[in-house]
Amino acid sequence: MPTRTKLYRATGLLATASLVAAGPCDIYASGNTPCVAAHGTTRALYNSYSGRLYQVQRGSDNAKQDISALSAGGVANAAAQDSFCSGTTCVITTIYDQSGRNNHLTPAPPGGAAKGPQSGGYDNPASAIGAPVTLNGQKAYGVFISPGTGYRNDATSGIATGDAAEGMYAVLDGTHYNGGCCFDYGNAETSNTDTGSGHMEAIYYGTCTIWGTGSGNGPWVMADLENGLFSGYNLKQNTADPTQSSRFVTAAVKGEPNQWAIRGGNSASGGLSTYYSGTRPNAAGYNPMHKEGAIILGIGGDNSISGQGTFYEGVMTSGYPTDAIENSVQANVVAAKYAVTSLTSGPAVNVGSKVSFHLTTPGYTDRYLAHNGSSVITSIVSSSSPSSARGSASFTVRTGLGYSGCVSFESVDTPGSFIRHYDFVLELNANDGSQSFAEDATFCPQAGLSGTGNTIRAWGYPTRFFRHYYNVGYVASEGGPEAFDSTTSFNNDVTFLVQASLA
C-alpha cells in the first residue's frame, strides 16, 4: 500500500498547508476512510504514488505500454503515450488501481442488458486521445466513454458489500453526457446482471429521466442504486439536486446503514454542495442495501451500454467520509487546476473555409469524398469537372455542432445539410437540431496517421475516423468488428488532404 502523508487539523478542518502535500487518498486516510480503489488516468491520487496509472495498446502492432506518473503524486506522463502512439491509434486497455488492492479496471464482459461489440461480447476500450486536458498546465488524458465502451472488475478486494459503509467521488466532464443508461462509476453486481434493488451504489451523471431527476433539464449528479436512479429520498425528483453547468464536475456519493448522500461541485473552483443527505429512498429493497462489491465505469450494473461521459479520476473508500474530508478532497481537486486543451492537431482546418477531402491512398488519389444524395462516397473529380460534381465534393467548415472545439462540415450545394455518421456510415443529412445529430456531425481534425494531411476523428467516438472503404465513407476503428474496420491500408485510407474546395 502507498505510504500516506500524515495530516493535521486546524480549526476543525484539514490545514491548508497539508493539502499541498496530500493526495485525495491521503486525505481520505486521515479521516479513517481509506481508499480501497483509486483510479486516475490524469494523475497520482496518493502523494507517494509514482507507479502505473493506465495501459495503452496501439493499433499498428497491438503492443502495450504502461503510462505512469511523471513523479510521486504527479501528473501522468502524457509525452510517453504520445510517443508510443505516434502514427497509429491507441486505446486504454487497463486503468490501474493505485490503492495497492489490484482493483484494476479492464473492458467489461457481456451482461444481462447487453453484449459489447468486441470479440466475446466485451465492451470497447476507450480511445487514448479522446479526452485531453491539462493539470496545472501539464497535459494528460481522461477516459472518453462512448456508448458501447465500459470497464469493470468483478473480483475486487476491500469494496463494500451488503449494507457496509462506503464513499466515492469522481471528476467528470460536465458537458459530455446523454440520457442513456447508464454512465456510472462505483459499486455494482459481481454477476453483470440485475440482481435486484439495492444491489448497486454508484455515481451516475447524465439526463436520464426514466427514474429520478433533479431540477431543471440536467445533467444531474445522482446515484444508481439498481432498478432506479435516485436524486434523494423521493423516487421521482429532488429539486435540491441542480442541473450542472461547469466544464468539470466533482460528483460524490456515500452510503451507510439507513443514511446516504449526494454532493457535487465545480472541479475547477469553489467547494462541494450537498444535494441530499438523509435516509434511504422510500422504496422497497434499499434499506438495508445489498451491495455486491464489483466496480464499474461508464456502464450500468447489468452492462447497460447506452450512456456516455468522460472520467478523469475517482476513488472508492472503506467507511462513510465526513463532509469535511470530502471538502478537503475537493480543495485538492481544485488545486490540480483541470483545464481544457485542444482536441485538434495537424494542418489547420479553419472555420468558415470551404474544403474538399482529397484521398491519399495509392491508386485512389484521383478521388475525393463527395455525396450522392444522402450517401457519402468517393468520386473522381477535378477542377475541370462539371459544377454539380465539384459542388458535391465541397463543404463549408462550421464550428462543431456538438462541441465548439471541433468542427462540422456543411454541404456547399445542399446548405443546412452536414456530414454525420449513422451506424458508423457517413451520410449527408439535414440538421434536425437534436443532440445526437449535433454530436454525430462533429469531427476533430488531427495530424494524418500516414504522415501527411489530416485524419478526421469522430468527436463522440474518438476511436473512429473518416475512412473510404470500397468507395463508401465510414467512421472506422482500426481492427474493429466491422469489415470497414480492416487494418489493411488503414492509415492511408483515413488520411486526407483537406484542400481548398473544388467549388
Image (cartoon, grey):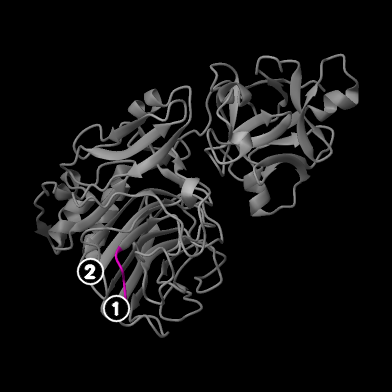
Residue 151 horizontal/vertical position (percent): 40, 51
Residue type beneath disc 1: Gln
Mark 1: give few (<14), some (14-19) or many (20+) Cα within 10 Å.
some
Residue 354 seen in the figure: yes
Residue 251 horizontal/vertical position (percent): 37, 59
Residue 320's disc number:
2
Residue 109 horizontal/vertical position (percent): 42, 54
Q: How many marks?
A: 2
The residue closer to the viewer here, 376 or 41, is 376
Q: Residue at x 74, y 40 (%)?
A: 427
The residue closer to the viewer here, 66 or 210, is 66
Image: 255 above or below 173:
below
Cβ–Cβ under 8 Å for marks 2 and 1: yes
- Where is mark 1, residue-wise? 259
Q: Main secondary structure of the magenta part?
A: loop
- 82 on left or right of 212: left
- 163 on left or right of 386: left
Q: CA distance from mark 2 to mark 1?
A: 10 Å
Q: Residue at x 15, y 47 (%)?
A: 17
Image: 495 above or below 290:
above
Determine whether the residue tagged by mark 2 lies in a helix, strand or loop. loop
Mark 2: give few (<14), some (14-19) or many (20+) Cα within 10 Å.
many
Image quadrant for the C terminus?
top right
Q: Is residue 121 magenta?
A: no
Residue 271 seen in the figure: no
Residue type beneath disc 2: Tyr
Determine whether the residue tagged by mark 1 lies in a helix, strand or loop. strand
Image: 18 above or below 242:
above
Q: Which residues are magenta?
A: 289-293
